[in-house]
Image (tube, rainbow, N blue to C red):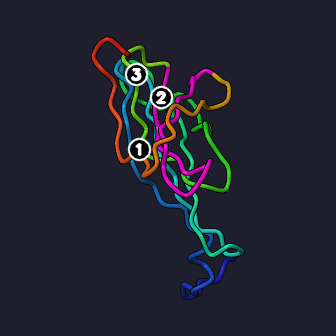
């Protein structure tokens, strides 16, 4: 038998919250951002997760973490091919830069080194 208790301040450190969602152009995958606070550093971090869907839009597996680390990976944007994602991250410094990752596996690749950082990204219709 479990006993109930009031939510304590320290419980907040263990909560994860969902951020941005992006549906792939083919409708078969959702990229979602999960945020979590780190008590030791008193910072938040975020990672991009993938959830694969069947033809009716139902999840066919558990979500899979695509990115990770001690920084923030946010604002995923799908390529027209439904295989690659652009995202913003501060993993290589204080300012967000644009990164690219193949959703079938591999490490992210840094695309920009802009002094004041990047605030949004988009693909052209032809995927360039």
Q: What is the count of numbered marks?
A: 3
Give the magenta-colored segment's residue range. Answer: 84-104
Q: In what element is the residue under mark 2?
A: strand
**Residue 123 point in image, percent of width and height:** 34, 24
Q: Quick one: 25 or 92, which is closer to the camera?
A: 92
Distance of mark 1 from mark 3, alpha carbons?
13 Å
Residue 85, disc? 2
Q: Are marks 2 and 1 in contact (CB under 8 Å)?
A: no
In the rendered image, which residue does mark 3 sit on? 79
Structural crowding at the residue carrying mark 3, measured as other residues with C-alpha within 10 Å and reported as few (<14), some (14–19) or many (≥20): many
Q: Nearer the viewer, residue 23 or 99?
A: 99
Helix, strand or loop status at disc 3: loop
Determine whether 72 is above or below 80 in the image: below
> Does the stretch in magenta take in 43?
no
In three-dimensional space, the C-alpha distance between marks 2 and 1, rounded to whole angstroms, equals 10 Å
Residue under the image location 57 percent in, 34 percent down: 110
Q: Position of residue 99 (x, y in %)?
A: 52, 35
Decide: few, some or many residues near mark 1? Use Cα within 10 Å; few <14, some 14-19, many ≥20: many
Assign a secondary structure to mark 1: strand
For the N terminus, give its image quadrant.
Answer: bottom right
Q: Check residue 75 in the rendering and tell me which mark sits there, or answer none.
A: 1
User: Where residue 47 sits: x, y (%)?
Assistant: 57, 48
Q: Are marks 3 and 2 in contact (CB under 8 Å)?
A: yes
């Amino acid at each position: 038998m479990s006993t109930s208790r009031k939510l304590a301040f320290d419980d907040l450190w263990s909560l994860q919250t969902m951020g941005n969602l992006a549906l792939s152009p083919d409708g078969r995958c959702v990229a979602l951002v999960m945020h979590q606070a780190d008590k030791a550093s008193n910072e938040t971090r975020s990672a991009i997760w993938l959830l694969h869907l069947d033809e009716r839009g139902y999840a066919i597996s558990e979500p899979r973490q695509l990115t990770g680390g001690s920084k923030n990976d946010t604002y995923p944007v799908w390529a027209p091919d439904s295989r690659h994602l652009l995202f913003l991250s501060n993993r290589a410094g204080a300012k967000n830069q644009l990164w690219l990752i193949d959703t079938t596996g591999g490490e992210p690749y840094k695309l920009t080194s802009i002094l004041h950082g990047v605030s949004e990204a988009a693909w052209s219709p032809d995927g360039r």
